[in-house]
């Protein structure tokens, strides 16, 4: 079996947790991720997302920046404390600079601008999973995808 085949098979089997308070966004993102063959868990409450991130096995977490209860930044910060090696992709309709301002020093792997295309979502997640190691996480080095201008 080639390395490329093994890597592509692994990517198709990714386990992705998505946390967004907008049910329509959850549905759309879930369908998009499903089209790649990813195993997804979709939740609308940050507290539930934190429990799942800390007690289940995921390859990546996709979080909305703007949610009640401190938003995605607070959730990402809590995940960083409990699972520092878990790649986090933040998604937002804000500009990249606004996202970075909102998340402060929270360690994220990528920022995905809303609205985003299917390929932007796929690239953000696959690169986050392939690139992410604990030493690589930093706000300044977060990759940016989608409509962040």
Image: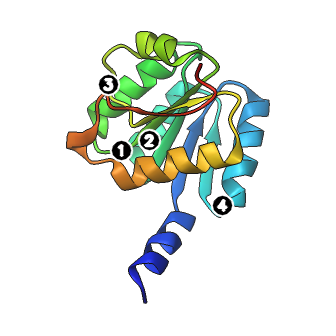
Q: Is residue 82 above or below residue 95?
A: below
- N-term mark: 4 or 2: 4
Is label 4 in a helix, a strand or a loop? loop
Crowd band around label 3 with a 10 angstrom C-alpha radius: few (<14), some (14–19), many (20+): few
The numbered dot on residue 86 is 1
Q: Nearer the viewer, mark 3 or mark 1?
A: 3
Crowd band around label 2 with a 10 angstrom C-alpha radius: few (<14), some (14–19), many (20+): many
Is label 2 in a helix, a strand or a loop? helix
Cα distance in 3D space between marks 4 and 2: 21 Å
Q: Nearer the viewer, mark 4 or mark 2?
A: 4
The numbered dot on residue 140 is 3
Q: Nearer the viewer, mark 3 or mark 4?
A: 3
Is label 3 in a helix, a strand or a loop? loop
Q: Residue 73: image x %, image y %?
A: 44, 19
Q: Residue 26: image x %, image y %?
A: 71, 36
Q: Residue at x 31, y 25 (%)?
A: 140
Q: Is residue 13 above or below residue 123?
A: below
Q: Residue 87: image x %, image y %?
A: 39, 43
Is label 1 in a helix, a strand or a loop? loop
Cα distance in 3D space between marks 2 and 3: 23 Å
Residue 146 appears anywhere in the view:
yes
Q: Nearer the viewer, mark 2 or mark 3?
A: 3
Cα distance in 3D space between marks 2 and 1: 9 Å
- N-term mark: 2 or 3: 2
The residue carrying mark 4 is: 36
- N-term mark: 3 or 4: 4
- N-term mark: 2 or 1: 2
The residue carrying mark 2 is: 53
């Amino acid at each position: 079996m080639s390395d490329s085949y093994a890597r592509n098979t692994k990517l198709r089997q990714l386990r992705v947790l998505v946390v967004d308070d907008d049910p329509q966004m959850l549905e759309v993102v879930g369908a998009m991720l499903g089209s790649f063959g990813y195993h997804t868990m979709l939740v609308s409450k940050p507290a539930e997302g934190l429990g799942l991130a800390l007690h289940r096995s995921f390859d990546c977490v996709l979080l909305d920046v703007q949610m009640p209860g401190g938003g995605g930044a607070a959730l990402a910060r809590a995940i960083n404390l409990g699972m520092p090696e878990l790649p986090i992709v933040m998604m937002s309709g804000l500009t990249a600079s606004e996202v970075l301002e909102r998340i402060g020093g929270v360690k994220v792997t990528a920022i995905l601008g809303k609205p985003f295309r299917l390929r932007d979502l796929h690239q953000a997640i696959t690169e986050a999973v392939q690139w992410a190691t604990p030493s690589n996480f930093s706000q300044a080095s977060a990759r940016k995808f989608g409509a962040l201008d």
